[in-house]
Image (cartoon, helix red, strand yellow):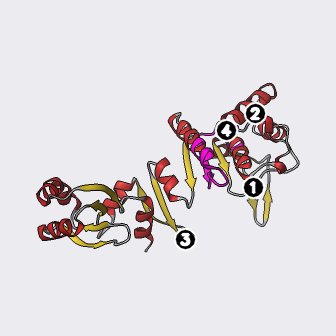
Amino acid sequence: MSAIIQANQLSRWYGIVMGLNNVSFEIETLRRIGYCPEGEAVPKDLRPLDWLKGLALLSGIAGGAVKARCEAILERVRLPREHWPKRMGQYSKGMKQRVKLAQGLLHEPELLVLDEPMNGLDPMGRQEMAGLLKQLAASGVSILISSHILAELEALCKNILILNWGRILASGSQKEIRSDLKNWSEELSILCDAPEKLARRLFDEGVLLGFDLDAESGFLNIRVKDARTFYSQWTGLLLESGVNVQAIRSQSRSLKNIFDKVTT
């Protein structure tokens, strides 16, 4: 990127008097950033095309290209055409979310900042939104998402930044964060025909920190001492035990688990 702020003809001080001489500032960064807030920041009495046209002109888009650009961006966020003539006060929360995203993309930003972008969307809408964000990322747009819905972030984001009261507690990929955490242990849930027998075999081999059996679900929950050693021996130990396994779930590799360990 070039300079964030360009200042020309700056003022000068003469004692307590400030002299101004055609001061002008150009904040280049704002032209490169799109923002979609969490709140319903849309004018209720306007139709989406009218609102976007005004924003497009303020963004410096040439007048002749405004209508086509606005229509294209509404199509891109998949707001059905039959709703375009309606005033935005009549829109559902999910429809407003699509229009907010459209205004954030209108000037083709290099960085898109999204605050809770999935709010108000039904399951199909969430899937469409996720697909659109992936397309944008693949096209070279950098996307910063703030959300408390960790499962959605886990499916969308390659890199994660965990903040607590303004402090960065961890950053990087999930794998990198896990490797940086002290006392990190793999946690697996295993559904099998003889959970006590499997737990005894693994414990006797010394690869577990602990285990418990969920009587209601039938899952054996194990806490692994050293992940690399465990996975190198796991197949052999399972065959030796003679236990039949129906399902294995990783409880420690989810983003929620990482967040809980980092913030507690």
Earlier residue among tags 1 and 2: 1
Q: Residue shown at 79%/35% (left/top)?
A: 82
Per the image, the residue denoted by label 3 is: 165
Earlier residue among tags 4 and 1: 1
**Mark 3 and mark 4: span between their CA atoms?**
33 Å
- Quadrant location of residue 53? top right
Q: Where is residue 45? Give x, y as percent.
A: 88, 48
Earlier residue among tags 3 and 4: 4
Per the image, the residue denoted by label 2 is: 70
* Magenta part of the chain: 103-128
For label 1, the crowd category at 10 Å Cα-Cα, with few meaning under 14, some 14 to 19 and many 20 or more, is: some
For label 3, the crowd category at 10 Å Cα-Cα, with few meaning under 14, some 14 to 19 and many 20 or more, is: few
Q: Of residues 204 and 69, which is closer to you in this image?
A: 204
Quarter holding the C terminus? bottom left
Per the image, the residue denoted by label 1 is: 40
Q: Give the answer, above or below, for where 216 lies relative to 192.
A: below
Per the image, the residue denoted by label 4 is: 77
SS class, disc 3: loop
Q: Amino acid at mark 4?
A: Val
Earlier residue among tags 4 and 2: 2
- Quadrant location of residue 255? bottom left
Q: Amino acid at mark 3?
A: Trp
Task: Answer whether residue 115 is magenta in the image.
Answer: yes
Task: Answer whether residue 179 is magenta in the image.
Answer: no
From the viewer's perspective, is the residue at label 3 or at label 1 nearer? 1
In-image side of 203 versus 83 (left or right): left
Q: Which mark is residue 153?
A: none
**Mark 2 and mark 3: span between their CA atoms?**
38 Å
**Mark 4 and mark 2: span between their CA atoms?**
11 Å
